[in-house]
Image (tube, rainbow, N blue to C red):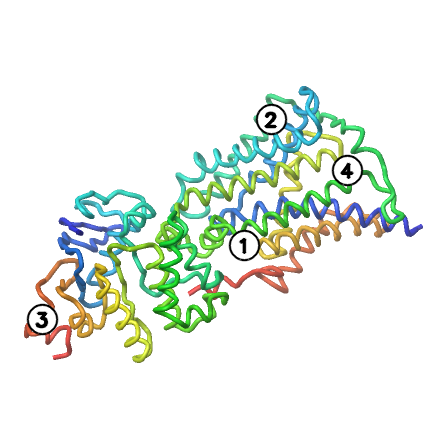
């Protein structure tokens, strides 16, 4: 029953899921690295991105790439606005205050979407060129599957270069070590933090668009579970570490898809339980995650 | 150049600075000395905007900077080199320097300053691509000073540059401070080694539990019997 083409198809699925989890996890980890905030509203940025893409696809006569670009900019702007009005006033307050606020932001977005857009899931009709199937190395895949992986990898490479080589990328890394001292370098840390939120929300928007494209549906709570899974991915990789978020995302994607694909049907329903059990095991063996820095080494 | 008027700073309910007033003239080295908890580091933090005073004012070249954001104070030329080095361990030496100069727009002066720092501290040039966290304590202090210089200070706030360093390294650091003075830089120096600070400085303020106890030319303070007993080991 596990024919080579079945295995190959599952491999492609795992790459898809891993790519999406990685994009979401990076956004969580970038914000956590600087503010020590676990942003519970992060998954909802996926939802908003997916709805914006849906609106672009259905009501505007624009090419398909506009349904990707417009959500990125809209959601990045929303991320910056949320930071400005919900989180910035709490800078310097105990970390838990910001965390609770992010729960409130999440609840506002989800219920706002519920009230205005109803709980009814909406179908996403992908443009024909994304639905058609092609043979890649003997494996038959949808163009959309390839788009997900290539786009996610391109964004990750782009982000890595940005963080490594630009002034604001260096400032982001400095802030994740020490925000106070970064200010003493003449760096406007509010700008750095706003940039981090824009990147974080923009990547979540991409993830949301890809997710809704892959599964063909959008609903007000669609970001909740992937947001939670991405948090698991970020923690497994070592939260605060961008490479760790990528690694954690792909590990989780593969673990989850292979668990469902190769376990007997009585067990495979426990997919989400398996994911969280995986988190527990990793944390028992490596409390700071696979690539996590040791906080204690900070003088 | 710098005037502080009646500065009061609180940590929660603890009254840390109880009305500090002091002045620094252009080209001077002014030392702040006093025992632990006297308020030296707190004074510098209030100057650079890291701490907000409850009352009082800070003027830099006639401009009230008391309530400016930290990065704007830096960009005016008041640069704080903090206690305990505080280099970014997971950035390279070059990135630490680049970060501190990132707000500057003039390319040639920037490159000249970078070269000057590598001339002052050749070891930093050798280790420019190494993580700052892998440097020795003395090298980290050199990087901390170099980093402050990259921000183009007109007034350098130097906090405990000799703290925890081997005597030979301390000599080296003080030589650099001396060289900066030759270049005409204005420095407000906090130093637990009161003897060395008074040798180097033009004037000094002695702080005690949040007050200025006494101030005057460094030479006079060195010969003041009360200062000798309390801070210079008899």
Give the Cα separation between the discs numbered 1 and 4: 30 Å
Q: For the residues marked 2 and 3, what is the alpha-carbon distance in whole angstroms?
A: 73 Å
Q: Which residue is mark 4?
A: A144
Q: Mark 2 or 3, which is nearer the eye? A: 3
Percent position of residue A178, x then y: 42, 55
Q: Nearer the viewer, mark 1 or mark 2?
A: 1
Judging by the rendered image, the residue that carries numbered circle 2 is A113
Instruction: Choose the circle earlier in sequence order: 1 or 4.
Output: 4
Secondary structure beneath disc 4?
A: helix
A282 relative to A162, above or below: below
Residue A274, image x, y percentages: 73, 52
Is disc 1 in contact with disc 4, using a CB cutoff of under 8 Å?
A: no
- Name the residue at 63% across, 56% down: A236
Q: Are marks 1 and 2 on the same chain?
A: yes
Residue B219's disc number = 3
Label 1 resides on the chain identified as A
Q: Which residue is mark 1?
A: A164
Report, in whole angstroms, how far the alpha carbon at label 2 lies from the one at label 4.
26 Å
In the image, residue A33 above or below residue B187: above
Q: Are both tags, 3 and 4, on one chain?
A: no
Please tell me which residue is depicted at 84% across the width and 41% down the height of the picture: A141
Q: In 3D space, how far apart are the residues under numbered discs 3 and 4 (Cα atoms)?
A: 78 Å
Chain to which the residue tagged by mark 3 belongs:
B
Disc 3 residue crowd, few under 14, some 14–19, many 20+, Cα 10 Å: some
């Amino acid at each position: 029953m596990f024919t080579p083409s079945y295995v190959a198809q599952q491999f492609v699925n795992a790459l898809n899921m891993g790519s999406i989890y990685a994009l979401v996890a990076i956004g969580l980890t970038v914000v956590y690295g600087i503010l020590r905030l676990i942003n519970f509203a992060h998954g909802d940025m996926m939802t908003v991105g997916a709805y914006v893409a849906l609106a672009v696809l259905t009501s505007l006569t624009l090419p398909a790439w506009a349904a990707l670009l417009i959500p990125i900019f809209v959601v990045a702007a929303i991320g910056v606005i949320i930071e400005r009005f919900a989180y910035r006033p709490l800078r310097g307050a105990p970390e838990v205050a910001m965390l609770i606020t992010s729960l409130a932001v999440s609840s506002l977005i989800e219920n706002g979407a519920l009230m205005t857009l109803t709980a009814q899931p909406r179908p996403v009709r992908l443009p024909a060129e994304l639905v058609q199937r092609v043979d890649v190395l003997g494996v038959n895949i949808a163009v959309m599957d390839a788009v997900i992986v290539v786009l996610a990898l391109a964004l990750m490479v782009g982000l890595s270069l940005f963080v490594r080589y630009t002034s604001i990328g260096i400032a982001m890394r400095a802030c994740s070590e020490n925000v106070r001292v970064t200010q003493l370098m003449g760096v406007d840390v509010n700008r750095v933090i706003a940039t981090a939120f824009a990147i974080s929300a923009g990547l979540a928007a991409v993830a949301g668009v890809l997710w809704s494209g892959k599964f063909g549906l959008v609903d007000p709570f669609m970001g909740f579970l992937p947001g939670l899974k991405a948090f698991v991915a970020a923690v497994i990789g070592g939260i605060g570490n961008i490479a760790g978020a990528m690694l954690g995302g792909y590990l989780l994607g593969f673990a989850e898809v292979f668990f469902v694909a190769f376990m007997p049907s009585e067990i495979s329903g426990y997919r989400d339980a398996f994911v969280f059990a995986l988190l527990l095991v990793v944390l028992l063996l490596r409390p700071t995650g696979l690539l996590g820095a040791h906080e204690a080494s900070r003088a | 150049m710098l005037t502080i008027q009646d500065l009061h700073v609180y940590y929660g309910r603890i009254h840390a600075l109880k009305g500090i007033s002091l002045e620094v003239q252009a080209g001077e080295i002014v030392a702040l000395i006093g025992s632990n908890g006297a308020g030296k580091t707190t004074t510098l933090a209030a100057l650079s905007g890291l701490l907000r005073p409850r009352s009082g004012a800070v003027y830099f070249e006639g401009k009230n900077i008391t309530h400016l954001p930290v990065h704007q104070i830096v960009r005016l030329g008041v640069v704080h080199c903090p206690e305990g080095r505080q280099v970014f361990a997971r950035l390279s030496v070059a990135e630490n320097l680049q970060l501190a100069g990132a707000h500057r727009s003039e390319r040639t002066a920037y490159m000249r300053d970078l070269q000057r720092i590598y001339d002052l501290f050749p070891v930093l040039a050798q280790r420019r691509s190494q993580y700052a966290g892998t440097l020795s304590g003395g090298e980290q202090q050199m990087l901390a000073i170099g980093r402050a210089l990259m921000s183009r200070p007109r007034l350098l706030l130097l906090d405990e540059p000799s703290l925890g360093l081997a005597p030979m390294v301390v000599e080296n650091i003080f030589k650099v401070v001396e060289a900066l003075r030759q270049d005409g830089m204005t420095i407000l120096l906090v130093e637990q080694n009161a003897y060395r600070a008074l040798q180097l400085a033009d004037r000094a303020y002695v702080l005690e539990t949040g007050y200025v106890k006494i101030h005057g030319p460094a030479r006079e303070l060195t010969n003041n019997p009360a200062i000798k007993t309390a801070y210079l080991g008899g």
